[in-house]
Image (tube, rainbow, N blue to C red):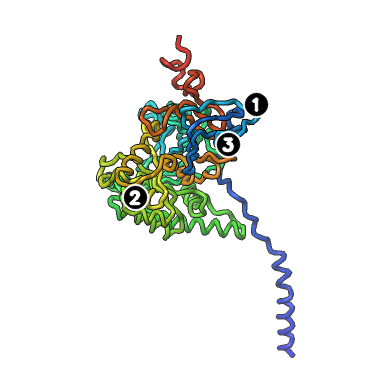
Amino acid sequence: MESNKGLILLATAAALLPGCAALAPKPAAAVRVNENPYPSTYERYPGALTIIRHATVFDGDGQRINDGTVVFGDGVIKAIGGAGLASPAGAIEVDGTGKWVTPGIIDIHSHLGDYPSPGVESMSDGNEATSPARPEVWAEHSVWPQDPGFSRALINGGITTLQVLPGSANLFGGRSVVLKNVPARTAQGMKFPGAPYGLKMACGENPKRVYGSKGNMPQTRMGNIAYARGVWIKAQQYKRKWDKYYRIGGEMPERDLANETLMGVLNGQILVHNHCYRADEMAQMIDMAKEFGYKISTFHHAVESYKIADILAREGICSAMWADWYGFKMESYDAVKENIPLVHNAGACAIVHSDDPNGIQRLNQEAAKALADGRRAGINVSDEVAWEWLSRNPAKALGILDKTGTLTAGKMADVVMWNGNPYSDYTRPERVWIDGAAMYDANHPGKRPVSDFELGQPGEGDVK
């Protein structure tokens, strides 16, 4: 009898448990943290419906149109074709006879705004060289929109879009930002709408020189990798906490700005741009990316990409390279002038980049040098295909190829009309449009952007 009473009590208690659970407080629902507290406020400048006729057109997708026609308006490319393409009513007609028309050049590696002109110490804001890992800093927070380098890149180099990166002192240098090359009062006013952020990483000599000279880790290349792996392990732990929080709610984990950037990389939202020269180190970085589950978008400088071009093609990793700038330190010593065409010839993604306020003004000429070096070595890349190194491929590497980089209907009307063959040393941009707005016209001195910093200087603005 007593045992039956016990069984009844147990059964009653079990029946009450669901009710008690229902009365227990539920975990608070997860709250999304603002992942972009500094959004783009970019507004395109007003443009007019425009048609360029009788030009030689490189469309950025490897095609050439002789006696070509390009139509753009409402900020986008409307149509591209041959001489028979009809003119829309009310369009401004531009005679392109003897001229070349291309997509605007995209520089994937710039420090304009962060290392602006004048190059004085008080304006040197590109390297937060206080720790080997500084993923919490954002390049855009150092960008000075009045840097005269922006307008020089536009009018001398046909640069319509650029990525501004932190420097390479650190293994993790911070976030990059993609900018439209337009005058604006704020960095947010230049931010390319919808462009993913990048994470600047570095390997090789720079981090071990900067921190090893202070008696800190890393002092060696093995120290570089060990330190970086330790940072990624902590980032994975941080991500697991937030994944759990977003899945079941409860108490929000403590925020950490450095790990927020790294979590963005692990989630595929932030693209990795890796400063790296030597082929063996690029291979090490690829292995580390696989270990921690992220993808490298682009190796920058990459003077030895030609040695592992097949691996880069297989992994889908771009190389942003110079035509012939090398030998200034040991890790840049074993270069060849055919690097860019060799990478291209292997089926990998080749890009011409600057990393220099003067070089950004002549990337078309840098591409021409690489093109000529490749042809001398028997790699016969056509002029129109080589333009992919300057517009399509950097757009792909930046995650904005759906918006710009080629003269494709519906994409942003970022267009340059050159006064001759753009691979010639004697050629300059004659007219530049960004989102279909006329930003520069060499035939009209008043139609050129000038930094506020330069207004009133001789040759710039109204000097009394």
Which residue lies at the image location 31% right of the left edge and 47% below the top edge? 378
From the viewer's perspective, is residue 278 above or below residue 443?
A: below
Residue 247 left/right relative to 15: left
Residue 423's quadrant in the figure? top left
The first of marks 1 and 2 along the sequence is 1
Q: Is residue 363 left or right of residue 82?
A: left
- Is residue 203 shown above or below 3? above
Q: Name the disc covering residue 305, or none.
A: 2
Comes first in the chain, label 3 or label 2: 3
On residue 90, the disc is: 1
**Residue flagged by tag 3: what amino acid is it?**
Ile
Name the residue tied to disc 3: 77
At mark 2, the secondary structure is helix
Q: Quadrant of the C terminus?
A: top left
Q: Which of marks 3 and 2 is in front?
A: 3
Along the polypeptide, which appears first: circle 1 or circle 3? 3
The spot of residue 68 in percent (x, y) is 52, 34
CA distance separating discs 3 and 2? 34 Å
Query: Around disc 2, counting alpha carbons within 10 Å, would you say few (fewer than 14), some (14 to 19), or many (20 or more)?
Result: many
Say if 303 sits above or below 142 in the image.
below
Q: Which mark is residue 372?
A: none
SS state under label 3: strand
Task: Report the front residue among 405 and 325.
Answer: 405
Q: Which amino acid does label 2 sit on?
A: Ser
Front in this rendered view, residue 167 or 108: 108
Asked which quadrant contains residue 286, the reply is bottom left
Q: Which of 202 and 408 is in front in this view?
A: 408
